[in-house]
Image (cartoon, grey):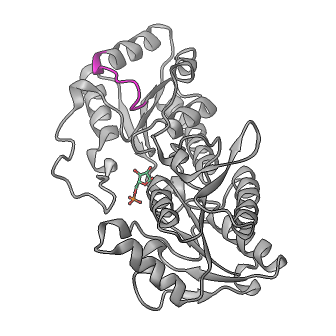
């Protein structure tokens, strides 16, 4: 069998660990592997599918990014896009595909499988917003970056008696903000799932000063809603091929920082962590689970399964239909959000 591998959507630490796992298990079982470059673009453009050899996947386990490259190309938006993807894959002798990605990439993977091409997925997104799975490649590392940043910002915030606003990624969910905020000891975490008012933030900061706490760390997710700050949310903003606007352009961290300083008089600074959260070496958790799920994906494909994805459930590996992980955006539950409020 010839197994194709692609990585789609935003890159995330641990993608190379998954590529290595897929390739190594495939080689071990006597199969060949093709690397498809730049996500789904590699199945629509010429010259982007190449043989992947054992040497190509040597030494890549600790590397961030993806040796295959990625893109946000959406074949479902192109005329006959899904059919063209299948024709290209067949032309290159690919018998089955492992598609590593988030909801967008896996949604296309499900369409490919529905159209009759053997396809399995591997869950990846630093946003951690796929349904059903307890693990997405990249999330653990991103939380680690936020945690380290908060540790560093604590010392400088304390030295200057400042308010520090830290804007983090996560698209329409607050997983990175919440888990990073809990691990890094944020005093306030603001996430899209639970809207807050600027006056609540200001009251919180005054209360802390009143308690003798001379500095504060606020983590705000890029997609958070703070009613008095809402400005043009990019209704006409440029969207990617999957219909997403660039939430970072809202500048919620910067807006919040200015408003806080204006309303309280407390010296305030903003840090936007941005793509630092997606760069660098993957954490052990991301490496281990990318490896487990990558190996499982190959075994599923070789065993004749399609339209499915291995996930982490109850601490072990489980297999569910691709449709199940993309059916809705998994959001932060109230009880986890309330956990952050214990530490304000
Ligand atoms: O989905 C991952 C993610 O990093 C989001 O958290 C963020 O909103 C988006 O991608 C940023 O995309 P880009 O890399 O295109 O700026």
Magenta span includes 150: no
Which quarter is ligand 1 in? bottom left
Residue placed most toward the observer, 61 or 265: 61
Dominant secondary structure, magenta: loop
Side of 34 where 216 appears, left or right: left
Q: Is residue 312 above or below residue 256?
A: below
Q: Quadrant of the N terminus?
A: bottom right
Q: Residue at x 40, y 76 (%)?
A: 83
The region drawn magenta spans: 191-199
Q: Residue at x 45, y 40 (%)?
A: 328
Residue placed most toward the observer, 344 or 90: 90
Residue placed most toward the observer, 294 or 76: 76
**Residue 129 picture location, percent across and down:** 51, 43
Side of 95 where 204 appears, left or right: left
Side of 258 where 274 appears, left or right: right
Q: Residue at x 76, y 55 (%)?
A: 288
Instruction: Please say whether residue 42 is visible from this viewpoint.
Output: no
Magenta span includes 194: yes
**Residue 210 picture location, percent across and down:** 44, 8
Q: Is residue 201 above or below residue 87?
A: above
């Amino acid at each position: 069998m010839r197994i194709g591998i692609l990585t789609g959507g935003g890159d995330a630490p641990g993608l190379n660990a998954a590529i290595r796992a897929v390739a190594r298990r495939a080689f071990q079982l006597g199969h060949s592997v093709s690397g498809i470059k730049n996500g789904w673009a590699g199945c629509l453009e010429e010259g982007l599918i190449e043989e992947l050899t054992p040497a190509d996947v040597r030494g890549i386990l600790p590397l961030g990014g993806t040796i295959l490259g990625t893109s946000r190309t959406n074949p479902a938006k192109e005329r006959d896009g899904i059919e063209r993807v299948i024709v290209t894959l067949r032309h290159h002798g690919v018998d089955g595909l492992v598609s590593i990605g988030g909801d967008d990439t896996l949604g296309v993977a499900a369409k490919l499988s529905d159209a009759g091409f053997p396809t399995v997925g591997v869950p990846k997104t630093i946003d951690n917003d796929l349904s059903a799975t307890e693990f997405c490649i990249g999330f653990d590392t991103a939380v680690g970056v936020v945690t380290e940043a908060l540790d560093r910002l604590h010392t400088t915030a304390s030295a200057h008696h400042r308010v520090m606003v830290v804007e983090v990624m996560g698209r329409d969910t607050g997983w990175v903000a919440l888990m990073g905020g809990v691990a890094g000891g944020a005093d306030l975490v603001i996430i899209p799932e639970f809207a807050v008012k600027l006056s609540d933030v200001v009251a919180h900061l005054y209360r802390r000063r009143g308690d003798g706490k001379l500095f504060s760390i606020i983590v705000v997710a890029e997609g958070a809603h703070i009613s008095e700050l809402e400005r043009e949310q990019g209704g006409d903003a440029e969207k990617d091929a999957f219909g997403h606007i660039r939430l970072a352009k809202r500048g919620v961290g910067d807006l919040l920082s200015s408003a806080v300083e204006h309303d309280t008089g407390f010296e305030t600074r903003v840090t936007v962590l941005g793509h630092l959260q997606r760069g660098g070496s993957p954490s052990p958790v991301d490496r281990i689970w990318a490896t487990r799920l990558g190996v499982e994906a190959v075994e599923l494909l070789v065993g004749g399964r399609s339209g499915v994805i291995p996930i982490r459930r109850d601490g072990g590996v489980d297999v569910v239909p691709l449709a199940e992980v993309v059916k809705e955006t998994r959001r932060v539950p109230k009880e986890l959000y309330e956990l952050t409020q214990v530490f304000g």
